[in-house]
Structure formats: C-alpha cells, structure tokens
Amino acid sequence: MTSEVPNPASPSAPTGPLAGLRVLELAGIGPGPFAAMLLADLGADVVRVDRPGGAGLGIEPRHDITNRNKRSVLVDLKAAGGPATVLDLAERADLLIEGYRPGVAERLGVGPDACLARNPRLVYGRMTGWGQTGPLAGAAGHDIGYIAVTGALGMTGPADGSPVAPANLLGDYAGGSLYLVTGLLAALHHAREHGTGQVVDAAIVDGTAHLTSMIHGMRAAGAWHDRRGGNLLDGSAPFYGVYQTSDGGHMAVGALEQRFYDDFCRLLGLPAEQAAWRADPARWEELRAAVAERFRGRTREEWTGVFDGSDACAAPVLSPGEAPAHPHLAARGTFTEAAGLLQPAPAPRFSATPTAVRRPPARPGAHTAEVARDWDAPALAAHDPAASGPREPSELPQLPKKPGPPHAD
C-alpha cells in the first residue's frame, strides 16, 4: 500500500488533470456521489451541497469514502434563500451533478433551466436509474432492478439457479457513475469549444444496456444464447469459472486461450486425456467435474502458490478485506490508507498530473465559510453552521439507519 498521501488535516492544493475545474454536487446517494468522487480524485474542486439531516446512506459521514477529496456546504433547498444560494454556486461552477427524480430539481428551483440561465456554459448532469423520460421515469428503484430489465442480471448465476446480484457495482457505478462522468467531460469539452453548456441525461438503464454491446454482437452471430449457463463467459465453460478449494475458499479460472489452458492443466495436474475434453462441449460437464476434483485437493493458499507467476490465468477469489494485501495490489499501491481509512486509491494513473487522496470524507457543512470565500459566494456564509457556534459531534446531522429509495426528493 502506498504512503504517498498528504496529511488530510492540511490538504494540499488540488492535483490531477482536472485541477481548476469546479463541480457542484447536490447531495444524494449511490452513483451521483461516486461520480463526483471520481472527478474530485482527478483534481476537480468538488463542493457538495448537503441537506440538513443528511442524504441517507446510513453510515457515519467520516466513513463515507465516496465523499473524499470534496468540500461540503450545508444548504436547505426548501428554506427561504436556499435555492438562490445554490444558483449563486451554479453560476460559478463548470459542472453540476444532481440525482433527484425527474422534476424534483425544477420544483426546488435549481433545475437546468434556472441554472443555465445564470450560467450558460454550465454542464448540468442528471443521474437517475430510469432516465428523464419513459413510463418508469418517476418510479423509485435500485441497482438490481435497473440491471434486471437490461438483460445484464439475467446473464449471471448458474444454469440451475437464480441470477446473482453483483452488489451494486454493475448498475450504479459501471452503468451509472462512469457514464455520467464520461458524459460530463464530453459536454465540458463542447462547452469550452462552443461556449454553451447542456444537460447530460445519464440513466443507469442506458449505461448498463450499453455495457452489453459485445454480448448483443455475439447473439447476432449465434455465439451467445439467452439460456444462462450455456455460454463461453457466463461460467458454463469449465475453463472459465470458479472452483472451491479444500478449505472452503475459491479459485477463479479464465484459461480461455489454448496456450493458457495448456499451462493451467499442467499446473493443475490434469491428465492429458481429460484436458483434451475441452475440444468437445459434450464432455464439458465431465471436464468440470475433473477440474473441481483437483481443486478440492488443496487449499486456496496452496493453489495460489501453484499458479503464482504462471500464464495459467488462475487467481484466488478474495474478499474486500483481503484484497489490499494481495502482493500485486500492494506493490502498485492500488489501496491506500488516509485519515485512518483503508480505501481504493484514485484511478486511473497519470504520468504528468498525478492524483492523490487530499482530503478525508467531507462532513456535512464543514467547509461552508471556506467555499464562500474561495468561490466568492458571500450569500453562502449565511448558511454556515459555525455561525451559530460550534457543534458537538452528537449534534452533527445524523443519517437514517436504512437508506431510502435513490434519486428521490
């Protein structure tokens, strides 16, 4: 793990390729905050507008890594002067991110028309599950429902079992956050070239469907079938799947190419006559059973040692708690420790404009006066919690124990 992290008590000047970019984030949960964190990791000055009472993630703010490298101001959009203050900030921003249900930002007075009227060059990003249009646009939802209707969830899991939810990585973050960031940066390029901003409608269903492009191409070519468990990359091939070890651990195998498969079979100790079953799909179940039997003969750690340094394309299946100690990840500094939190380091990496974890997760309202000064927004100072005296930790906005529906007012 890398130690090249500034002291969070004294954040360094923003570094990274987006240094100097101003981003206004209207607090939410899930893909919006993660997209804003990615921009902040890349050096942008991200100011999060938190609401009194918190956004509803359900963990203490100091542990919410998706709010690292940001600053927070506390503004009640339903109170007098709240919308006007946010519009003042939008006037000074390059990008804005909101994750309300369609129409909510407009009702609050901070929708795209109002913001673009104040700042015609603004890129206004809208992060939702269903998108701004369509019969489900106003409905509540979560990652699992979004990836369900796009066909992505239906590709997971065993042939004789139910689909398996991949946490909320596939929909919220891959199909949502990453597409929002891509759209924001593309629209920012246009705004700087032509002097006009625009609205980016980032829907998780759109992004997740887009992620399945290769699969749809394979379907058209007859190389992919909708029946789960009958395709090359869905775990049905005995040389691309997961196997249990003697200690209850698991090893992941991805020996797709013949030369890698040959290396895999040699190290596994699989007899040549059984290894040859790869060429006959009718014998894949026999091959799977033979491979499984071999894996059950040793522990995960032992098999990790067997395959270490080879081209067999076999790797141990690690938990999030185990991953930081993996030798390759540790050598690269893929995880880092800052403000007492072990966390993924910023990605990707840049040769000329390196990134860093500069600030710990922002506590709601902690930077109101600082942002009012730096963004030259004096109206914001009236919302500074410190103006009414210091607050004890117990008086900080408490988040609900259970998260509510995302993208909701």
Image (cartoon, rainbow, N blue to C red):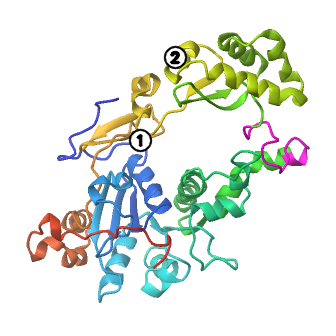
Answer above or below: position of 175 versus 112.
Answer: above
User: Which residue is painted at 27% across and 69% down in the image?
Assistant: 398
Residue tagged by mark 2? 302
Q: Is residue 309 visible?
A: no
Does residue 237 appear to the left or right of 185 in the view shown?
right
Which contiguous range is marked in magenta?
219-235
Residue 222 lies within the magenta run: yes
User: Which residue is painted at 63% across and 77% down in the image?
Assistant: 137
User: Which residue is painted at 43% across and 78% down in the image?
Assistant: 118
Q: Could you tell me how far apart the alpha carbons at marks 1 and 2 are, in whole angstroms?
A: 32 Å
Does residue 148 appear to the left or right of 327 in the view shown?
right
Residue 286 or residue 150, whichever sits in front: 286
Q: Position of residue 159 (x, y in %)?
A: 77, 46
Identify residue type, mark 2.
Glu
Identify residue type, mark 1.
Pro
Residue 338 lies within the magenta run: no
Determine the secondary structure under disc 1.
Answer: loop
Is the magenta region chiefly helix, strand or loop? loop
Answer above or below: position of 19 versus 143.
Answer: above
User: Which picture quadrant has residue 377?
Assistant: bottom left
User: Which picture quadrant has residue 7?
Assistant: top left
User: Which residue is painted at 36% across and 64% down in the image?
Assistant: 58
Answer above or below: position of 44 versus 73.
Answer: above
Q: Is residue 385 visible?
A: yes
Residue tagged by mark 1? 346
Q: Which mark is residue 372?
A: none
